Amino acid sequence: MGTAEADRPGARVSVRAMPLWRIRFARELPRYLIGALSIAGLAASARFAIAPPRASTPAASLRAPAPADRAAEGYASLFARRYLTWNAAEPQASQRALASFVGGGMEPDAGLQLPASGEQRVEWDEVVQQREPVAGEHIYTLAAQTDTAGLLYLTVSVVRQHDGSLALGGYPAFVGPPAAGPAQPSIHLREVADPSLATVVERALRNYLGASAGELASDLATGARVSLPGMALSLESVQRLDWSTGHSSVLAVVQAQEARGAQYTLAYELDVVNDGGRWEVSAVQMDPDA
């Protein structure tokens, strides 16, 4: 009987020792997972609220500013001058002036039909804006001062062809000026309170405006290069003297007068340095070497 009981299969119970931390971890794991998921959800919600996702711009649609094409600018300027300069008594002169621009692809005189009488001259013109709608094409906006119609704005399309030559990209267009508003002088600047600095700036500007290079040199920092104005002026007064935003220069608003009696209100920025307690000027308004 004992042998039969020994051979009969039966349930066995094994006892195995486990560290307490593993038992606690296995029991608490579901709670940890739920907590982690909740925190992740809250973090994602906060991220979307603070910085919502924005549609990214494909790299192909980003275009760097078109490099300046001086030849194309000159071509547009020359066309504008010839297009806006005419004499109704000499229509052939206008046609000859524009013939090299229009060729056979446009109407004679670029579509310009002169009136029965009158004339117009361009006193000056200047490119004030450009854009590049497609590679190789520049559209220039030119300001042109005429003697009869006043200040006009004209857009001219210039194409750089495969062989490198220039050509008009179409008819011109009269447009309005670039958007502009009233002057916005700087505010919230800190006034220069150092009397010694104010004295140096006023003296330097007096000598600068008066083209007194020798006197000005005494207030210049070592290595400073200054280009004197071509028209000598006398400094009448310094109206304001403020620190620039970065406190590396001062901004001076002055009144000056020229020999003929004309008076000007002018603004100058002067880079200043303090060398051992002595203020010196390292630049006035512009860099002559740039």
Image (tube, rainbow, N blue to C red):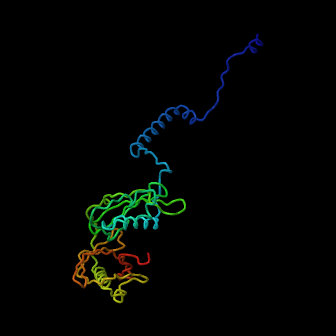
- In this view, which residue lies farthest toward the bottom? 214
Q: Quadrant of the C terminus?
A: bottom left
Q: Which one is nearer the viewer's eye here, 19 or 135?
A: 135
Q: Which one is nearer the viewer's eye here, 149 or 13?
A: 149
Location of residue 266 with respect to 48 vertically, above or below: below
Location of residue 227 with respect to 16 vertically, above or below: below
- Can residue 215 be seen in this snapshot? yes
Pinpoint residue 285: horizontal percent, then vertical percent: 35, 75
Residue drawn at x 51%, y 33% as measured from the top left: 28
Q: Which one is nearer the viewer's eye here, 106 or 248?
A: 106
Pinpoint residue 210: horizontal percent, then vertical percent: 30, 85
Q: What number of labels is visible?
A: 0
- Can residue 145 be seen in this snapshot? no
Q: Specify the quadrant of the image occupied by residue 228.
A: bottom left
Q: Quadrant of the N terminus?
A: top right
Is 25 on the left-hand or right-hand side of 256?
right
- In this view, which residue lies farthest toward the right? 3
Residue drawn at x 47%, y 53% as measured from the top left: 62
Residue drawn at x 38%, y 75% as measured from the top left: 286
